[in-house]
């Protein structure tokens, strides 16, 4: 039976998903062995059934990220953190380190929407639509929120790295990456 | 400022190796060492300002901003805390109108915590400038504060003085000795200079043999044979050698050196003199911890008197060609300086960081000279061994741990204090002596030692079983074991010098996880995490602090497994127990003035 | 000529001269022992602990421990590799090591050590995420101590080679950091040509030279193709690689 894979990008840039497409013609080989469930690649928004592998790109910066991640954890046997943002927060985590005030989230929002001369925001308001997910107090890595079974670092991990990792995992073999395939950038 | 700095530097001949003393003088006079003063000191000593800053920022008694005229330091040790230290802090805070860590607007008072004052037997305690106040109550604190505010000098605070030499005009402290059990070696009546006089009639080789026969091991806790240490120092070729007495007793729960320094200082100096004669040293240093500054004038007077009697100085003890003198080096608040090579760094005017070994201090120590560093109690024992003989001393204790040992007992017992007992006594026997029928846990050897449970009270206090420098803290069933562990880790985090990675970073990680466990946010597998992390810290750290700092965690996991089991959960949902979405959203809810569509069940009502 | 003797590292016989550290003897023999705070030309410090080995069963830092005749040294055993991974992870988690945006990425020794040790998997270590201000006051140099691993190489280079003592450790414990001789870097006499500022001195992206960012393209950076080892890395290795 084909293995089911789900993928999602949380607080990420979709770069890791692009990298997945970088496996090029090997995608066809992959599709012989797996079926994609919930994923932006097929635009499925919900799990149709339990999956063997969940690939999660990006960390958690808002409540929706947390919610989605928890759903992935509940619905996937093996959860894989893909890319530097998922592994350690990546670029979004910079907000944890640059906030110096006693009211860091306000400082972050005001810098982003009000106080920067690079911003065009004639309403001079911070977006606050009811449909917008609430931001978390800081950016969390996947492992901060749920148990993560495996990590693939990189920004993004190369197509080869992803391919080799998936191939090994699908075959139930230990992942062995060549030196050039392990990158933190 | 300028004049204070110049005169302080001049006082020590602009000697860079005396930077500790220079900074202590300036701190005392100016109440702080600001960047401008650092610049000036650096200029005088021909070093860079950042070197001075490195020193000022290392020692807790130095400050880079101006503190109050009077600094009140509250002991935050676990025993003091259990004795109501929190309440006492609140009383000081209220009476002075400042929080701990602040200075009053008029610049008169600063209030702060220090990790360990050395008064666990009379807790809660505090240090007001150099004056110690003990057995604090709310009422006593209010009285102290009102008298200080009325202009009474800290050293005039004591209504009555403690027993023995605590009443000496140069000490005049309310500290009491609490000698509960005087043994046959140190705390019994001892004759003056008998050991020294006998030693000076013998050859150094014979002294070493006598010491070897006595089986004396270092009283600091590590238990290294004293004779072997001295022999290396004597055998290492050098033009000078140095004898240092480690009076930097900083292991929480230890206060027996305080009592020896008060009542047996003569014996200690004798021991140092014997060491100097044996290894061929002309330089002696007593490294006295900053918290015991109240004993300094008294110790200075003893040294002076001995110089006048010809027991120190040129041809000391009447021995032609034996020239030996001792100076006191004050510490400035750093537990790590109890480590012998860190202590030497401190004496040299450096940050109190341990040195790389080899070379060992006995080969190359203070200023590069072979240096013997021994504990106060060790030197006292030496003097007694010279008087009564190695065989006599070896008759006490066990095979590997000879002699008597001073135990500092504190915590949940009716008779806290100093007990001189032969090595090998069981914990239970000691608990009977101190009257601790409710003891449920005993911390042997301070935070870096081991915490044992009731079923282990039959274990013996000696090198063969439970090695200790003398700290014995008793905890009753009422106490929260993990609170104690958390405190101990906090102590190590605070006191790690930060030199090596595992001790600097690893201890922070240990503490963070214990905090989470205390909040019920951890799972069973976190015990493996703690064990592995603890092992890496213990194995890879550079000095004894890191080698032992995971002990509070490791020994309680071993000896109090149920304490952990009660707080650890087994989760099956794959979510991290430690992640709390509600608190992570709190800020956002407040700023957006709305509730969470996902995580607030009654969202619509909001 | 000082006395020669032999000892073993992971079963390989090594020759050493009297007075050599395990590290020096290993370097001369072409055996690599991983290290971060130790670098050629500077006094060994023994602080990062990444070079820990077991000498006759005792864990010691290879850069400061003298080689002992006839001793057996364990370098690449699972136990030692485990310690090294923990230590490198501790350094990662202590600072802000955002490789994707770091100018030193690809030539960073901390990163290269992570690669060499095969660190991919999640740890339970928390990220400490320091928030120290970046000092960009100097016209030619930026100092971002959030990326500092406290190896002290700049301190020793400035003190012992440049004879300026611009840098020094300040603070204690987890608050320990590298301070500069003044309120900010621009107040000091540090210069671009100083050894302390040399790209080979800072193993990470803490000391950055202005106007020289990202000079090597991805794929051609120092550690892109080859793991960090003797002779690969700035000023690595005392002897022949």
Image (spheres, coloured by chain):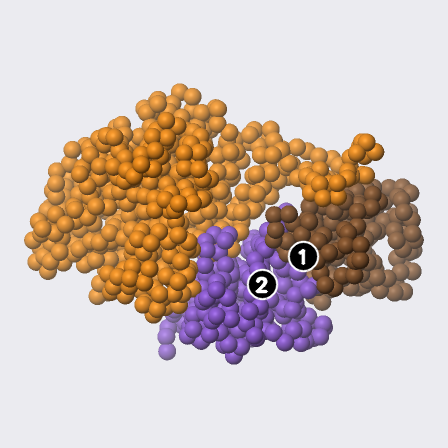
Chain colours: A brown, B orange, C purple
B422 or A5, which is in the foreground? A5
**Residue A157 visible at all:** no
Q: Chain of mark 2?
A: C
The answer to which quarter of the image holds residue B594 is top right
**Residue A36 visible at all:** yes
Assign a secondary structure to mark 1: helix
As drawn, A36 above or below C104: above
Q: Left of C235 or right of it: where is B208?
A: left
B180 or A139, which is in the foreground? A139
Query: To which residue does mark 2 refer?
Result: C134
Which residue is rendered at x = 24% and y = 46% of the image? B296
The answer to which quarter of the image holds residue B528 is top right
Q: Left of B495 or right of it: where is B40?
A: left
As drawn, B172 above or below B372: above
User: In this rendering, which labeled residue sits more in front, label 2 or label 1?
Assistant: 2
Task: Report x, y in % for residue C143.
Answer: 56, 66
Residue A41 numbered tag = none
Marks 2/1: CA distance?
Answer: 13 Å
Q: Residues within 10 Å of mark 1 (few under 14, many from 20)?
A: some
Q: The N terminus of chain B is located in which quarter?
A: bottom left
Query: To which residue does mark 1 refer?
Result: A94
Which residue is rendered at x = 16% and y = 49% of the image? B303
Which residue is rendered at x = 25% and y = 64% of the image? B10
Q: Chain of mark 1?
A: A
Assign a secondary structure to mark 2: loop
Task: Report x, y in % for residue B319.
Answer: 9, 55
Q: The C terminus of chain B is located in which quarter?
A: top right
Which residue is rendered at x = 31% and y = 30% of the image? B417
B161 or A49, which is in the foreground? B161
For the image, the number of numbered tags is 2
Task: Report x, y in % for residue C179.
Answer: 48, 63
- Contact, CB < 8 Å: mark 2 with mark 1? no
């Amino acid at each position: 039976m084909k293995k089911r894979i789900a993928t999602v990008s949380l607080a990420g840039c979709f770069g890791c998903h692009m990298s997945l497409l970088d496996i090029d013609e090997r995608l066809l080989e992959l599709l012989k062995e797996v079926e994609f469930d919930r994923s932006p690649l097929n635009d499925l928004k919900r799990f149709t059934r339990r999956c063997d592998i969940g690939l999660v790109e990006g960390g958690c910066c808002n409540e929706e990220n947390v919610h989605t991640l928890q759903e992935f954890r509940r619905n996937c046997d093996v959860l894989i953190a893909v890319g530097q943002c998922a592994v350690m927060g990546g670029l979004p985590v910079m907000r944890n380190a640059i906030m110096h005030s006693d009211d860091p989230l306000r400082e972050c929002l005001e810098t982003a929407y009000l106080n920067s001369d690079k911003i065009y925001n004639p309403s001079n308001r911070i977006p606050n639509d009811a449909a917008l997910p609430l931001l978390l107090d800081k950016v969390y890595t996947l492992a901060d929120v749920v148990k993560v079974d495996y990590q693939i670092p990189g920004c993004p991990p190369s197509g080869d790295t992803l391919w080799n990792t998936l191939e090994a995992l699908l075959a139930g073999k230990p992942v062995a990456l060549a030196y050039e395939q392990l990158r933190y950038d | 400022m300028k004049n204070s700095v110049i005169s302080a530097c001049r006082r020590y001949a602009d000697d860079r190796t005396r930077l500790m003393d220079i900074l202590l003088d300036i701190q005392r006079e100016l109440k702080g060492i600001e960047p401008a003063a650092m610049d000036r000191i650096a200029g005088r000593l021909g070093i860079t300002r950042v070197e001075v800053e490195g020193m000022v920022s290392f020692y807790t008694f130095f400050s880079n901003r101006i503190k109050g005229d009077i600094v009140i330091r509250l002991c935050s040790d676990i025993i003091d805390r259990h004795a109501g230290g929190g309440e006492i802090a609140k009383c000081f805070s209220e009476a002075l109108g400042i929080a701990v860590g602040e200075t009053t607007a008029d610049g008169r008072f600063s209030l702060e915590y220090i990790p360990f004052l050395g008064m666990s037997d009379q807790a809660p305690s505090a240090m007001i400038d150099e004056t110690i106040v003990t057995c604090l109550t709310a009422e006593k604190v209010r009285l102290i504060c009102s008298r200080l505010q009325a202009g009474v000098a800290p050293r005039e605070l004591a209504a009555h003085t403690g027993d023995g030499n605590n009443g000496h005009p140069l000490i005049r402290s309310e500290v009491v000795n609490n000698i509960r059990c005087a043994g046959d070696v140190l705390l019994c009546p001892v004759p003056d200079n008998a050991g020294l006089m006998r030693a000076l009639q013998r050859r150094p080789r014979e002294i070493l043999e006598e010491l070897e026969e006595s089986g004396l091991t270092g009283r600091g806790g590590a238990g290294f044979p004293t004779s072997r240490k001295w022999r290396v120092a004597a055998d290492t070729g050098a033009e000078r050698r140095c004898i240092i007495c480690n009076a930097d007793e900083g292991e929480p729960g230890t206060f027996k050196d305080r009592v020896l320094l008060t009542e047996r200082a003569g014996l200690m100096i004798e021991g140092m003199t014997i060491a100097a004669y044996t290894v061929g040293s002309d330089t002696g240093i007593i490294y006295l911890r900053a918290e015991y500054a109240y004993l300094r004038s008294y110790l200075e007077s003893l040294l002076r008197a001995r110089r006048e009697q010809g027991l120190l100085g040129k041809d000391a003890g009447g021995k032609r060609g034996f020239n030996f003198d001792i100076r006191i080096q004050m510490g400035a608040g750093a537990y790590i300086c109890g480590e012998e090579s860190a202590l030497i760094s401190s004496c040299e005017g450096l940050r109190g960081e341990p040195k790389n070994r080899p070379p060992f201090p006995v080969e190359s120590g203070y200023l590069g000279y072979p240096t013997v560093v021994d504990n106060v109690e060790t030197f006292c024992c030496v003097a007694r061994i010279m008087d009564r003989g190695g065989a006599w001393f070896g008759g006490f204790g066990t095979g590997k741990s000879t002699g008597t040992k001073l135990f500092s007992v504190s915590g949940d017992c009716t008779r806290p204090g100093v007990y001189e007992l032969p090595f090998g006594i069981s914990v239970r026997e000691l608990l009977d002596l101190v009257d601790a029928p409710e003891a449920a846990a005993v911390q042997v050897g301070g935070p870096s030692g081991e915490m044992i449970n009731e079923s282990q009270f039959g274990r013996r206090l000696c090198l063969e079983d439970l090695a200790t420098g003398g700290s014995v803290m008793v905890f009753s069933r009422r106490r929260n074991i993990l609170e104690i562990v958390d405190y101990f880790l906090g102590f190590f985090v605070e006191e790690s010098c930060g030199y090596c990675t595992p001790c600097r970073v690893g201890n922070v990680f240990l503490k963070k996880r214990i905090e989470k466990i205390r909040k019920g946010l951890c799972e069973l597998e976190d015990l493996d995490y703690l064990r592995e992390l603890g092992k890496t810290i213990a194995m890879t750290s550079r000095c004894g602090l890191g080698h032992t700092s995971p002990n509070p965690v490791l020994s309680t996991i071993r000896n109090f497994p149920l304490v952990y089991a009660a707080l650890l959960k087994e989760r099956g949902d794959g979510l991290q127990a430690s992640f709390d979405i509600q608190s992570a959203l709190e800020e956002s809810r407040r700023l957006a003035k709305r509730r969470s569509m996902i995580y607030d069940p009654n969202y619509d009502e909001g | 000529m000082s006395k020669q003797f032999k000892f073993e590292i992971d079963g390989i016989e090594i020759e050493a001269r009297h007075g050599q550290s395990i590290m020096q003897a290993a370097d001369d023999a072409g055996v690599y022992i991983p290290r971060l705070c130790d670098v050629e030309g500077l006094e060994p410090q023994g602080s990062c602990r990444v070079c820990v080995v077991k000498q006759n069963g005792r864990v010691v830092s290879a850069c400061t421990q003298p080689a002992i005749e006839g001793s057996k040294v364990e370098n690449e055993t699972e136990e030692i590799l485990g310690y090294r991974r923990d230590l490198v992870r501790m350094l990662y988690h202590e600072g802000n090591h955002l490789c994707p945006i770091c100018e030193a990425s690809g030539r960073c020794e901390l990163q290269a050590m992570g690669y060499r040790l095969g660190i991919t998997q999640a740890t339970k270590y928390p990220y400490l995420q320091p928030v120290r201000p970046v000092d960009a006051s100097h016209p030619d140099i930026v100092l971002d101590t959030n990326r500092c691993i406290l190896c002290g190489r700049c301190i020793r280079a400035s003190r012992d080679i440049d004879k300026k003592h611009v840098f020094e450790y300040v603070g204690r414990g987890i608050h320990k950091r590298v301070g500069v001789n003044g309120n900010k870097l621009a107040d000091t006499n540090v210069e671009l040509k100083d050894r302390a500022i040399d790209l080979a001195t800072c193993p990470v992206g803490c000391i950055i030279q202005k106007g020289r960012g990202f000079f090597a393209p991805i794929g051609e950076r120092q550690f892109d193709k080859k793991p960090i080892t003797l002779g690969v890395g700035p000023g690595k290795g005392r002897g022949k690689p």
